[in-house]
Image (cartoon, grey):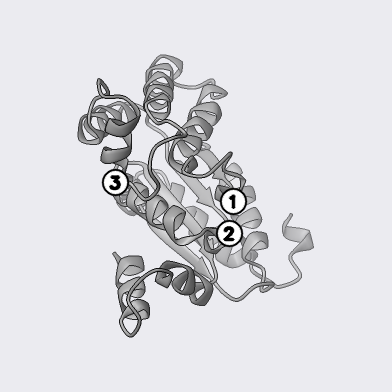
């Protein structure tokens, strides 16, 4: 809560909430924001303040909180993300008809993955590995983008502790975000320790160029 903000970050949370969810603000249609800092500096507290401020905006945005380190198993991060997204949207009482179609699509997309697929696949490859009859990620993406434009509310996805993931899941998450971050009204807020995140992304890359390549991947 703002009255418990010992680090005086509520002003920053208010400004970011305004950028993300201001009515008729073109900049609020889609954003990807990184909240960075060392362990213990208050990144999670900042996310909590932001979520509180977003809850006070009108119209109230849809807030999807995803904890990637709680993924149910190896290689399940992408389907877990879509199941979580669908669960949150399924509780929304506004735009019920449009949201029901989005929820059905998100669940179908998540079901197209299997727990036995090889690690490190792109979303397109993973869908095909899980179900040979599944539409491609591109086909899913186009339909999902069209449906989300019919929900006239900002959707804010908040992902904490991104740096807790290993290299395989980090690459899967960044590929997923790159595939969704240009959707209108859909924004991503990521919290992480940049140094630790770069170290994790560097794992398995050739020595000498690992950090450079990891940072290039992150900046994309």
Q: Earlier in the sequence, mark 2 or mark 3?
A: 2
> Which numbered circle lies on residue 20?
none
For residue 69, the mark is 1
Counting from the top left corner in percent of width and height, residue 110 is at 42, 29
The residue indicated by pointer 3 is 179
Q: Does 213 sit left or right of 65 as displayed?
A: left
Q: Earlier in the sequence, mark 2 or mark 1?
A: 1
Q: Nearer the viewer, residue 59 or 86?
A: 86
Labelled pair 2, 1 in contact (Cβ < 8 Å): yes
Q: Residues within 10 Å of mark 1 (few under 14, many from 20)?
A: some
Q: CA distance from mark 2 to mark 1?
A: 7 Å
Query: Would residue 123 be found to the left or right of residue 114 on screen?
Result: left
Determine the secondary structure under disc 1: helix
Q: Residue at x 30, y 26 (%)?
A: 147
Q: Looking at this view, name the residue that lies furthest to the bottom.
A: 208
SS of the residue under disc 3: helix
Residue under pointer 2 = 161
Q: Position of residue 101 (x, y in %)?
A: 37, 18
Q: Residue at x 50, y 77 (%)?
A: 195
Residue 85 image offset from top left, x and y in percent = 49, 34
- In the picture, measured across the screen, residue 89 lies left or right of residue 124, that is right
What residue lies at 24% left-to-right and 25% top-to-bottom? 135
């Amino acid at each position: 809560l703002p009255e418990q903000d010992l680090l005086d970050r509520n002003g920053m949370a208010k400004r970011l909430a305004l950028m993300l969810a201001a009515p008729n603000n073109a900049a609020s249609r889609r954003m990807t924001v990184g909240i960075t800092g060392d362990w213990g500096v208050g990144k999670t507290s900042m996310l909590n303040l932001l979520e509180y401020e977003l809850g006070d905006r009108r119209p109230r945005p849809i807030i999807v909180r995803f904890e990637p380190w709680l993924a149910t198993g190896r290689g399940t991060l992408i389907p877990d993300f879509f199941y979580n997204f669908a669960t949150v949207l399924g509780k929304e009482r506004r735009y019920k008809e449009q949201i029901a179609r989005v929820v059905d699509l998100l669940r179908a997309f998540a079901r197209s993955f299997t727990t036995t697929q090889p690690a490190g696949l792109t979303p397109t490859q993973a869908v095909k590995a899980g179900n040979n009859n599944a539409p491609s990620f591109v086909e899913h993406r186009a339909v999902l983008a069209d449906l989300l434009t019919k929900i006239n509310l900002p959707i804010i996805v908040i992902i904490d502790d991104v740096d807790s993931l290993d290299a395989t899941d980090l690459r899967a998450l960044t590929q997923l975000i790159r595939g969704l971050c240009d959707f209108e009204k859909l924004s991503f807020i990521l919290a992480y320790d940049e140094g630790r995140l770069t170290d994790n992304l560097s794992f398995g890359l050739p020595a000498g160029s690992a950090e450079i390549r990891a940072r290039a991947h992150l900046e994309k």
